[in-house]
Image (spheres, rainbow, N blue to C red):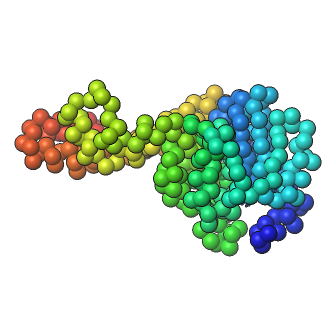
Amino acid sequence: MDKEHVFFENYARNWDRDRKADASILSSFMTLAGIRPGSDILDAGCGTGVLLPYLSAATGDEGRVEGFDYSQQMIDVAKEKFSYLANVTFTTGDVLKYAFLKKHYDVVCCLNFYPHIAEHSRDVIRRLYEALVPGGMLLIMHDMPRKAVNAIHGGQPVLPPVDVLEEKLISAGFSVVIAMDTEQFYFIKVVKTADESDFVYDDEEQPDHRTARALHHAYHHTETKRVLNRLSRITGHVEAIKRMIEDGRDCSDVLVQLAAVHSAVAGVSRVILKDHIDHCIVDAICEHDADAVENLKKAINTFVK
Ligand SMILES: C[S@@+](CC[C@H](N)C(=O)[O-])C[C@H]1O[C@@H](n2cnc3c(N)ncnc32)[C@H](O)[C@@H]1O
């Protein structure tokens, strides 16, 4: 057992006394996650199980939640607190070694867990990716701001800025749906792409109906995967805003989120425009394609209006 493992074994009985989870933030996480009833959920690094009642309620009688932790003491405390939840089971195991069944879970949650696997993040992300069904979601959540998390870890940057973690998750094959790093919390929701070829839009993957010209241009685009990921993220963000409105959330909170979507849309437009100028237009000028240059002028006019 390494030092950190021993630390958690010894701390388990006092964990809830010293580390009060923020109920309103955990509820917001459930809203943002949008877990479907009937989901099969893994709570990785569940500790004393603070998230288990929320996950149990979200998935309902048809679903299943597995609290997973390498600390037997943490699991014992969680069992004592939540064995009455009929859809919850417990597993003691190390996320770095445990033989998870492939394509098994619909949702994997990591609440306040990432810093403990940060050193092995590539390996753990790959294992969790394989354990998810296609289309399944991975949630990385902290009910405190990133700065506070890193301060607890002696100022080490164990929890990176969302864009850094996003890149890691994207390179593992996930699509980012929501990524928020706020004054109160840190929340990332990514989805295992149903069929990676839907997202990796390179020359070999072009749909048949596209024209030769479109094929030519797509070949030269370098930002397609990034653009698709950004758009998936915006779509997820808009869905989360819809749920905020359905839940009667404060208008000012909704407006802040809408402003974030607005700037995300402007950002993705800039990426596409730059890609277009860098590639298609350079080609068009070389090929004396006056139509393409004229179309670019129109696109810029629409964009800057
Ligand atoms: C900071 S606690 C978070 C617990 C709980 N999710 C919460 O938010 O209260 C991190 C938990 O991860 C567990 N853990 C750390 N490394 C692990 C590993 N490699 N495999 C499984 N569990 C691990 C620890 O035992 C501990 O319970």
Q: Residue 196: where, in percent of width, then height? A: 46, 40
**Quadrant holding ligand 1?**
bottom right
Outermost left residue: 288
Q: Is residue 23 visible?
A: no
Q: Quadrant of residue 105?
A: top right
Q: Quadrant of residue 247?
A: top right
Q: Is residue 243 visible?
A: yes
Above or below — where is 302 with respect to 20? above
Residue visible at 62% across and 56% down in the picture:
124
Q: Residue 79: where, in percent of width, then height? A: 89, 47
- Identify which residue, 151 or 210, lies in the foreground: 210
Q: How many marks?
A: 0
Name the image quarter holding the C terminus: top left
Residue visible at 24% across and 37% down in the picture:
215
Name the image quarter holding the N terminus: bottom right
Residue visible at 70% across and 33% down in the picture:
39
Residue visible at 56% across and 44% down in the picture:
190
- Identify which residue, 242 or 69, lies in the foreground: 69
- Identify which residue, 91 or 57, lies in the foreground: 91
Q: Residue 179: where, in percent of width, then height? A: 55, 48
Q: Quadrant of residue 96?
A: bottom right
68 sits to left or right of 103? right
Q: Residue 243: where, in percent of width, then height? A: 61, 31
